[in-house]
Image: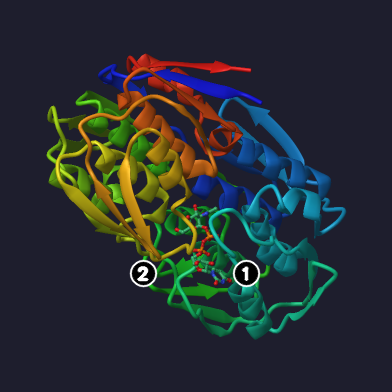
Amino acid sequence: MDKLLIEGGARLTGEVAVSGAKNAALPILCAALLSAEPVTFTNVPRLRDVGTLLALLGQMGVGIEREGDAVTLDAGALTAPVAPYEMVKTMRASILVLGPLAARCGEARVSLPGGCAIGARPVDQHIKGLQAMGAEVAVEHGYIHVRAPRLKGARLVTDMVTVTGTENLMMAASLAEGVTVIENAAREPEVIDLADCLTAMGANISGAGSDTIRIEGVPRLRGARHRIMPDRIETGTYLCAAAVTGGEIRLTGAQAASLDAVIDKLIEAGCTVRGEPGVIHLRAPSRLAAVSLRTAPYPAFPTDMQAQFMALNCVAGGAAMIRETIFENRFMHAVELQRLGADIHIDGNTAVVRGVDRLQGATVMATDLRASASLIIAGLVAEGETTIERIYHLDRGYERLEEKLAALGAKVRRIA
Ligand code: UD1
């Protein structure tokens, strides 16, 4: 199993290009299931999660052509509207095929995702929404069976803000008969990117980016071309990595507007951050100030940046309180950070981090995607060598990570 070796102490400087967003690419690639015509996507990141989803779509009979960062999907002749457990268990976002398959094929058989390291993560809201649109749903033998000759528009109110739930229902509604209104919708930029793609395919959607999305169903969607938005979590991760090393970096292909809450916290920590169209520039002070935060749905501070900011607070001046409100078990990186000498106390969903003068390199284990990113950030400032095990988690969501870090001056290498 691959490991990452980091020799701490290098100041990150220079320029790096941000890749297309994993969390936009996954739903948007699933949108191709809604059309019988080919759809071309550009700026598709080369990630393990994208590979897993393409394999799943391929199994369903979707034609796949890949050239550089472009992927063309042709769902003209779907063979089986089925997502087996073996695929769904490795990537929960596979649930995003449920809505499109139900709408396009009138039936779907998708494995229940089950729990994952960061919490239970049920999909009841996805199911409840499809039922409200007239689908018959049965959960049997670990599979969700959906039957719906033609979905009907409905008023859907989700019990909590769910990103993939909103996306699944928006895709299903775009081919439903009549008008669907999703209330309490997720406002994440990735939801807007998906709506833009569906609109290019001929869907009739308004309100994406607000908490009320209105979709007027159309009988069919056509082929289109869509560019995936930049990855705001990858962007935030590099900003944190540069900040913690007292560095100065320029991120190109980035979108500052989708990162307001994160940039505000970096400024509060003492960084100078400038956003221009397509570019973010950050200059860090020699020592950061601790910043408290609370995760919540967009536009508040993203749970996917919580671990990285915990690492940042480990070496900042002062103490910070971090409250995680989205997932119940998302502090697993804390014990690994403690192995590097961090001073962290956890009480339920709250972590208190007291900055220490220095961390010390050690062997640590990555537990999930963003936890791995926090260990890298800590390793970049730890004294001596840090070995991060189980980095396959990182390959799920960061494109060419060690190459990009090395280009910024980090001493990092992958060993088998
Ligand atoms: C998406 C992101 C993930 C991010 C998360 C929160 C993708 C592919 N993944 O995950 O990176 O961390 O949003 O910003 O975009 N919930 C239910 N029932 C449901 C659906 C959700 O109880 O049917 C709960 C979840 O357990 C969680 C909360 O709602 O506590 C938010 O989850 P949700 O927004 O659905 O996360 P994902 O869409 O899975």
Q: What is the number of the mark on residue 251?
A: none
Q: Residue at x 82, y 46 (%)?
A: 59
Q: What is the number of the mark on residue 123?
A: 1
x and y percentages locating residue 94 in the rendered image? 67, 54
Name the element at disc 1.
loop
Q: Nearer the viewer, residue 152 or 374?
A: 374
Say which residue label 2 marks: 210
Q: Quadrant of residue 206?
A: bottom left
Name the element at disc 2.
loop
Q: How many marks?
A: 2
Above or below for 180 versus 43? below
The amino acid sitting under disc 2 is: Ser
Residue behind label 1 places its C-beta within 8 angstroms of ligand 1: yes
Compute the Cα span from label 1 to label 2: 22 Å
Above or below for 328 versus 268? below
Above or below for 364 versus 247? below
The amino acid sitting under disc 1 is: Val
x and y percentages locating residue 149 in the rendered image? 79, 77
x and y percentages locating residue 247 in the rendered image? 21, 24
